[in-house]
Image (cartoon, grey):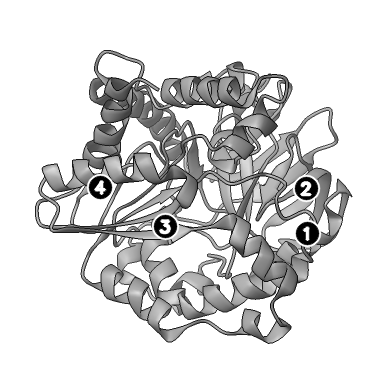
Amino acid sequence: MDNILLTKYARLIVKTGLNLQPSQTLVITSPIECAPFTRLVAQMAYQEGARDVVIQWKDELFSKIRFLHAPEEVFEEFPEWQKEFYLSYVRQGAAFLSISASDPELMKDVNPERMNKAQKTSGTALKEYRERMMSNKNVWCVVSIPTASWAKKVFPHLSEEDSIDKLWEVILKTVRVDTENPVASWDEHKTNLKTKMDFLNSHTLKSLHYTNSLGTDLRIELPENHIWLGGSEFTPEGLEFIANMPTEEVFTLPSKTGVNGTVVSSMPLNYNGNLIEQFSLTFKDGMIVDYSAEKGYETLKTIIETDEGSHYLGEVALVPYDSPISNSNILFYNTLFDENASCHLAIGKAYPVCMKNCENMNQEDLTRLGVNESLVHVDFMIGTSDLEILGRTLEDKEIPVFKNGNFVT
């Protein structure tokens, strides 16, 4: 891969994605396969004035070995030193970068209940860390680069080398690194997303009704004083950052008990190295009361049964069907990309930042207002070319939001 493009990408992540400040510490979580690029990002961070860069290496091949062979009780334990690692850096205001590049089917032979138990254990131990991230009290960013196993899944008919090159080409295009001035391109993109946010926020919608030919017929109530967000986000101090690169969505939160009907997935969901395909969820008063999946049912079950809050939704996100990632006609098997090719919802925890004045609220306040709390937040895709979304305002006026898969505006 062209070193000039890689350097542009690393600089874009540090300068625009994270908006790293002088003397700020950067914590990177990265697969070991991504080491060369991760080191380039670290070098760029130091050049931009970082106080320090700390890297947490992830080895998913070893993780599979552990899930297959370790005794059950280890998945109910979370090392105190690991908890202290995250809490110490998050409390000192560090920036956090995650590189997402997993093998979509690596864990298909692993008992999903073991993985879910480990996730619940870590989620409980790192509750403060997760809450700070989802409240934007620290800057954070998720990006991707190719790995061999992932690239071959996306482009199975190419050689390993060619599939990696092709995935690099596509990723760099989706994050606008292929443009002459990526920073300026992102500024323009943020402005376009703000137009959609302003349209939705100006109408103060109280509900959305989704329908399409797959069988989706879902009504979602929105809490009073909700906010639509998208593009860049801000810390309480006003520091701008971009949480996902790429991003094509505008999003808010549903009222916890205000979801009714059925929604059908439009893409496979890669969850912890397991694929869930052709699945549907049925809701009554916000709760998932029935679900099915042609593949990955047990994995879907473990997500839903994680805790009380995982039986409810936490995010409503709108993405036009006619958008750059969708128009590539590539199924990425990676939620960072697939969720930005399709309207999606999320099972579990809601983003408190989607409520006005959330910075002055504790969890009890948020719960009372219908903001869902959970140890998980799992996005799944529902957008199609014939998706229709009809909004209803506080004044009971109907507003077409989506027609034929795209924004009406």
Q: Amino acid at mark 2?
A: Ile
Q: Residue 3 occupies which quadrant of the picture?
A: top left
Q: Earlier in the sequence, mark 1 or mark 4?
A: 4
Please state which of the two labelled residues, at mark 3 or mark 1, is closer to the viewer: 1
Measured in 3D between alpha carbons, the distance from the residue under mark 3 to the one under mark 1, in whole angstroms, is 31 Å
Q: Earlier in the sequence, mark 1 or mark 2?
A: 2
Q: Earlier in the sequence, mark 3 or mark 1?
A: 1
Question: Are the two marked residues, 2 and 4, in contact with CB atoms closer than 8 angstroms?
Answer: no
Please state which of the two labelled residues, at mark 1 or mark 4, is closer to the viewer: 4
Q: Earlier in the sequence, mark 3 or mark 2?
A: 2
Q: How many marks?
A: 4
Residue that numbered label 3 is attached to: 355
Q: Position of residue 81 (x, y in %)?
A: 39, 82
Residue that numbered label 2 is attached to: 276
Q: Position of residue 317 (x, y in %)?
A: 55, 41
Q: Is residue 256 left or right of residue 146?
A: right
Q: Secondary structure at mark 1?
A: helix
Q: Position of residue 310 (x, y in %)?
A: 67, 66
Measured in 3D between alpha carbons, the distance from the residue under mark 2 to the one under mark 4, in whole angstroms, is 35 Å
Q: Secondary structure at mark 2?
A: strand
Tell me the residue at 36%/39% (across/down): 37
> How many neighbours does mark 2 have within 10 angstroms: few (below 14), some (14-19), or many (20 or more)?
many
Q: Is residue 253 left or right of residue 272?
A: left
